[in-house]
Image: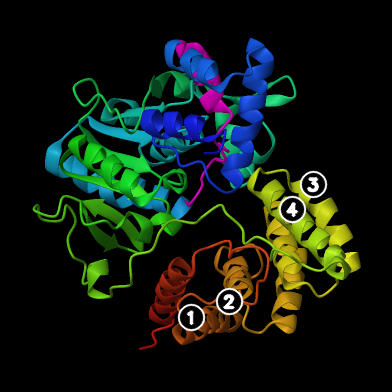
Amino acid sequence: MSSLTPFKDLVHRRCGLHLEGLAEARLVKAVEALQTDTDINDTSKLIAQLEQNEAMFDRFISQLTVNETYFYREPEALHWLADTYLPRRLAEKGKPLAIFSAGCSSGEEPYSVAIALLERYGERAKQLFHITGGDVDQQVLSKAQKGIYSGMSFRALNPALKHRYFRPEGRRLKIDDALRQWVTFCSFNVLQPNADKLGPFDVILFRNVSIYFDEATRRDIQRHLKQLLEPHGILMCGVTETLGNDLGILELHQAQGVFFFQESTLPSALPANDEPPYRDDPLPALAVLSETPPQPPENESEHKQPITSFNAALQQAHHLLNQNAFSEAAALLSDLLVQQPWSVDALLLAGLVARWQQNFADAYDYFKRAIYVAPECWPAHFFQAELFRLGELSDAPGQRKRGYAAVIRLLDASKQADGGLSVIAPPIPPGDAYFLATRYLGAQATTQGVG
């Protein structure tokens, strides 16, 4: 048994977190920090300390999740909530409506909802809606309550909204006090939801959180969240988590290109709008994105050692990208591409890093080079098309269409194709890429009056 196993078991039992792959590296660092802080190296004694000392356990948990979030993430969902679902919900039920961000991290998501609602309803929004954020990590909750942010938190926020709702606080920005006081925060463990103290909610956002949980845990979580929903209430996951959370507990629906879950025994809260539910076009259920990259082959001969070192560096670059250490990842990938200018793995990662750094033209060039080297690299086709769809580059409908069509064609040939990648795992699961490419390609055809 690994020395980490007791810690994994404790965290999984208490919080449901699945600490494998790159998450295991965070666990190693957290255990080392715990040993330093307590001057205890005996595993059983450390486990006992974590069991008995809630503050220590909270600090320990805080080191185990990436807490990668930012304002106005997946804005299509926010706009649909503010402009379509919530107005109809108000007309049906009346005020106030309750909205909950489960796994809210440092607060960017619930504050984004608040901004979207203020933009739609003005000051009336504060009487129409109650907004709550909850997280198991007490340190990020403290940050959320303070409402002070910097750097990458604003990478997707319209500058006008940034200017309207934030004020300088030293070298950082603080959210408007009236808005900050409107949104409330609470401790929330998805495995112990305290249904008697929370909810019920008209909307639960559980977005970009489920990557930390295995399927069995996700089932338990969804059952708990279902108990917190009002009748006809909805649960929304991150767009790339949709398939991984379609577990038969709640039914998946689509409206205006946005996907949400709802109690299957109840009628949809929204008119059909001639849009069939997602289940009319079924795809195989898939697990959420694994953080575990492929490992280099064992027992490589000595003359292949440089390749092994290159692969290890690629994995490190992937890890840095997942940790939002974009400058460090870019520097490492720059060195790797000097060594192997046509490494598909390195080119794809460099494109993703450039995109997060908002160097969209560079991102396009990296994806283009990856496709040149490996035409079967469906992740490069997908992310290149995304640059146009999201307006990060001036839209080129023909090129966007070709990109998504290439993803569908390549994954039709092999549903689990690795895309020509030999070291890292595809940054988006193939099933999700196929699902999204089909959706976006269909949306484009509808917009153009085709089909």
**Is tag 3's residue or tag 4's residue first in the polypeptide sequence?**
4
Helix, strand or loop status at disc 3: helix
The Cα atoms of the two marked residues, 1 and 4, are separated by 26 Å
Q: Nearer the viewer, mark 2 or mark 4?
A: 4
- The answer to whether the residues at label 2 and label 4 have Cβ atoms under 8 Å apart is no
**Which residue does the numbered mark 4 point to in the structure image?**
317
How packed mark 1 is, by other alpha carbons closer than 10 Å (few <14, some 14-19, many 20 or more), is: many
Q: Is residue 353 left or right of residue 403?
A: right
Say above or below: 180 vs 114: above
Residue denoted by label 3:
327
74, 243: nearer the viewer? 243
Q: Residue at x 23, y 20 (%)?
A: 197
Residue at (48, 80) in percent of width and height: 411
For the residues bearing labels 1 and 2, Cβ distance under 8 angstroms: yes
Q: Is residue 153 magenta?
A: no
Mark 1 — residue? 411
